[in-house]
Image (spheres, grey):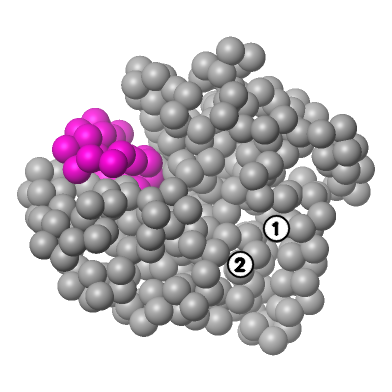
Amino acid sequence: MSVNGLIVPLLTPMNEDASLDKIGLKSLTARLMNKGVRNFVVLSPYGENSSLSVEQEKEAIRIVSSTIGARGNLLVGCFSDATDAIIEKVKFAEKFTSNCLVNIPFSSLTNEVEFIDFFDKLFTKTKANIFLYNNPFIFKRNIPIVGIDRIANWEKLIGIIDFSCNLTYFRALSDYHQSLKIFQGAEEYAVESFNYYCSGLAVGLANVSPEMFISLQKDSIAYGYTAMVRQELKLLTLMKEYFPKGKRVQSYKKILSVEGVIQEHFSGSLDALSEEDVSKLLKLIKTSIA
């Protein structure tokens, strides 16, 4: 099954001690499938993976894989600052899926020889189809376009999920749309990206309201970009008012907890929601975002 359209970068439901909430993860995945989602990233950029043990990470993969079965596509996030560690994570993920989402270590992002060497090692030692995770906020810089030019036609490289929040960079990626699938990871640019050969979205808010983004892509095809400007303004207002950067994981979990899908707990590295934040979210729930 080809990976196209909406990809949901799954939250990691947690217990009060920040351990993996197995029941919550299964419930969240099943809920999303019932709402039409067919592509998932486990251990995603929204997964708070640093608070999970290696065994909990492996258990999360098992749970999502068994819940999806043959009805959808699973991408496993394999992130590290070391090439060998990424390769080991991919090897384990291959027991459950043929698709992995990986980052490029910083040393390989800044050295052309190491950049090519990273992919040589990755593709020699693993069998999975690879999606690249671009996030300069975490990995200090964007994947260089000159590097993408070198690897765009490599057989097992399938696509890039871009979390740069930089439309200029996304437009540069779109030049490779005939060789790679390009996915937008920022809600703020969800509508605009469909003007640049976007293969789909991989946005965190889809954990809460997948229908919004499934219909958004369908509407962009049916009506064209110009007719979608109103939808873009609505989405921008929504993100600014209710989901400020730095509090999105917490906010998404709060909404889902009110709906009884998962617990609201998150890792200690994230800031708590203020009373005002919670009040706004409760009002939003009453207007039925989800």
Residue position for label 2:
190
Residue at 10 percent across and 43 percent down: it is: 125
Q: Amino acid at mark 2?
A: Ala
Can residue 282 be seen at all in this image of the molecule? no
Label 2: state its secondary structure: helix
Q: Is residue 175 above or below residue 165?
A: below
- Residue 240: percent from left, percent from top: 76, 58
Can residue 284 be seen at all in this image of the molecule? yes
Please state if 99 lies on the left or on the right of 170 as rendered.
left
Label 1: state its secondary structure: helix
Residue at 64 percent across and 44 percent down: it is: 246
The answer to if 168 sits in the magenta stretch is no
- The quarter of the displayed image where residue 280 is located: top right
Q: Amino acid at mark 1?
A: Met
Magenta residues span 75-101
Q: Are marks 2 and 1 in contact (CB under 8 Å)?
A: no
**Of 285 and 165, the residue lying toward us:** 165
Please state if 186 lies on the left or on the right of 93 as rendered.
right
Residue at 49 percent across and 62 percent down: it is: 164
Q: Earlier in the sequence, mark 2 or mark 1?
A: 2
**Of 284 and 7, the residue lying toward us:** 284
**Of 198 and 29, the residue lying toward us:** 198
Q: CA distance from mark 2 to mark 1?
A: 11 Å
Q: Residues within 10 Å of mark 2 (few under 14, many from 20)?
A: many
Q: Is residue 283 above or below residue 235?
A: above
- The quarter of the displayed image where residue 75 is located: top left
Residue at 73 percent across and 49 percent down: it is: 243
Residue position for label 1:
212
Q: Quadrant of the N terminus?
A: bottom left
**Of 157 and 1, the residue lying toward us:** 157
- Residue 115: percent from left, percent from top: 18, 59
Please state if 10 lies on the left or on the right of 123 as rendered.
right
